[in-house]
Image: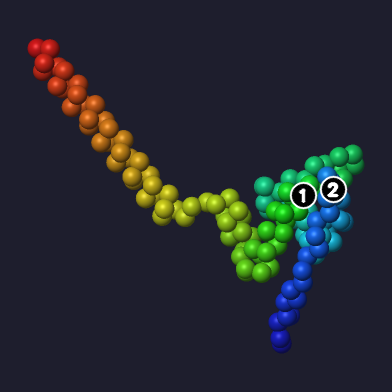
Amino acid sequence: MKRKQKIRRELPNIPDKLYFTISEVSELCALKAYVLRYWEQEFSQLRPIKRRGNRRFYQKEDILLIRQIRNLLYEEGFTIEGARAKLTNTPEPESQSAKMNITVKKVIAELESVLQNLQAEMTASH
């Protein structure tokens, strides 16, 4: 069985408005409304304004974020977890560990310097 062929289509320009309903965003991003609601649960950065009756109102920044998420998932093949990490710019654990080691070494060197200064003052005052 063949996989569905991806249809790449250009997304429409975002109109110059302050707020957009979920159905407008659905059209602007070529996504179903339920996908948008699901992504709100998965991506903490995506928080549309909720008004009376829990109606969602998105702003232009939200639409740009949704398009970025859409691109990561549908075009670049990221998983939801991978897209989430990419959006939050979470460094890989190895690089975090390396940065921590460098910081610890700097702190140790500073403390050793302070200790030497204190020892020198102690010997000079006696």
Which label's residue is closer to the chain start, 2 or 1?
2
Q: By what rule are the colours in the image chosen?
A: rainbow
Viewer can see residue 31: no
Q: Is residue 29 left or right of residue 123?
A: right
- Residue designated by label 2: 17
Q: Residues within 10 Å of mark 1 (few under 14, many from 20)?
A: some
Residue at x 24%, y 26% (from the top left corner)? 114
**Farthest residue toward the right?**
53
Mark 2 touching mark 1, by CB under 8 A?
Answer: yes
Q: Residues within 10 Å of mark 2 (few under 14, many from 20)?
A: few
Dot 2 lies on which element? loop
Residue 71 horizontal/vertical position (percent):
68, 64
Q: Which mark is on residue 60? A: 1
Residue 5 horizontal/vertical position (percent):
73, 80
Q: Is residue 58 left or right of residue 52?
A: left
Residue 24 horizontal/vertical position (percent):
86, 56
Q: What residue type is disc 2 on?
A: Lys
